[in-house]
Image: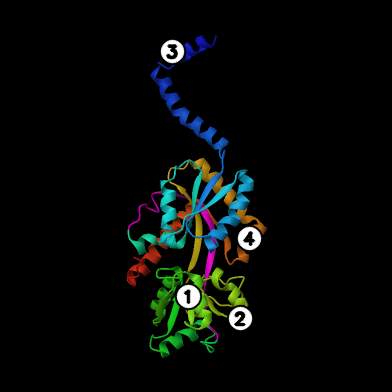
Amino acid sequence: MASLVSRSAFRSLRNPVRRAFVALALPLIAGSAFAQAWPAKPITLIVPFPPGGPTDVASRIVAQKMSVALKQNIVIDNRSGASGTVGAAAAARAPSDGYTFVMLATPTLLASHLYGPTSYDIFKNFTPVGSVYDLPIVLVVNPKSLPDVTDLQGLIAKAKAEGGKLNYTTAGAGSFGHLTTEQLKTIGKFDMQHVPYRGSAPAVTDLIGGQVPAMFSDLVAVLPHIRAEKLRAIAVGSGQRVSLLPDVKTVAEQGFPGFDATSWGGLLAPAGTPKDVIDRMSAELKTALADKQVQEKLESVGSFAAYRTPEQTGVRMRQDFERWGKVIRDNKITNQ
């Protein structure tokens, strides 16, 4: 009987119309079966920064929650180097089978502006899954070095009084703190001298020690020191005040209407990853970020849950790429 059925099926495929129908239907059937089976094994999430940093910590918090819903482990793979380009390049080379994702952070998005052409195109070689977190940036001063500076206008007045010789530090040339300060200097028509460090930790150490008086930093790096009153927060870069520092005014509130500078992280997949997988992963990400415990864990380390759809994430990538790319070009900033 089986052979008769097989021969009958074979003969039916001689009809060109039937062959065309089968050719169209098979990918749909296969795609549906794949979506139903996915994920059938652990998922790898490449984090292109070292363990313990804001991107890594946020990734682990969210991945842990999502793994429960997906019923598969999400394995964190730290591939640090060159503002995240090492990890991003590894993700771009990975199979687009739904088992490799990468956590994009603002430095990685802007890397081609700072380092020159990369081995991948951040827009062509990846598909957005959704944004994950916002990482507020805060302007802090050493209260012993600048005892009279309690707000942004006070710092600007001090910088102008010293003829542009006042120093400020950041986590490095091309860091988000560097770009934000340079844009603020242009808009505010004042000058300060940049003293870049290799990472937030040594910069904050010397800031507390008094070697440099001011810094635009991500909130994660300086929040404990603000709470310990070793540093004084005088402005936040985001468009709205930060709940962890409710009394600190935004840059926009201090004479720069519309100013909004926020670093952020988002989940990407290699281009060609099945849409069903992207949709499922994005839905699970949205659910995870809506969880109160996840939100509290993120806030405890200075970042905030901030889900956006794949489409909205793609728009934000393009807008930030163009905005900060202009700041980099105008100020001739490079990390090469």
Q: Which mark is residue 242?
A: none
Q: Give the labeled residue for mark 3.
A: 11
Mark-to-mark CA distance, 3 and 1: 73 Å
Q: CA distance from mark 4 to mark 3?
A: 60 Å
Q: Looking at the picture, how far across and down is residue 333, in whole percent?
A: 35, 70
Front position among marks 3 and 1 = 3
Labels in figure, total:
4
Q: Which-is-in-front pick, marks 1 and 2?
A: 2
Mark nearer the N terminus (4 vs 3) = 3
Dot 4 amino acid type: Gln
SS type, badge 4? helix
Measure how far apart labels 4 and 1 are at the Cα level.
Answer: 29 Å
Q: Is residue 109 left or right of residue 241?
A: left
Residue sitting farthest toward the right: 293
Residue at which label 4 appears: 295
Q: Looking at the picture, does residue 285 appear above or below residue 243?
A: above
Residue type for callout 1:
Pro
Which contiguous range is marked in magenta?
117-143
- The residue labelled by disc 2 is 229
Disc 2 secondary structure class:
loop
Name the residue type under label 2: Glu
- Residue linked to disc 1: 257
Q: Specify which label sits upstream in the sequence, 4 or 1.
A: 1
Compute the Cα span from label 1 to label 2: 28 Å
Q: Residue at x 49, y 73 (%)?
A: 202
Residue 174, position in %: x, y? 40, 68
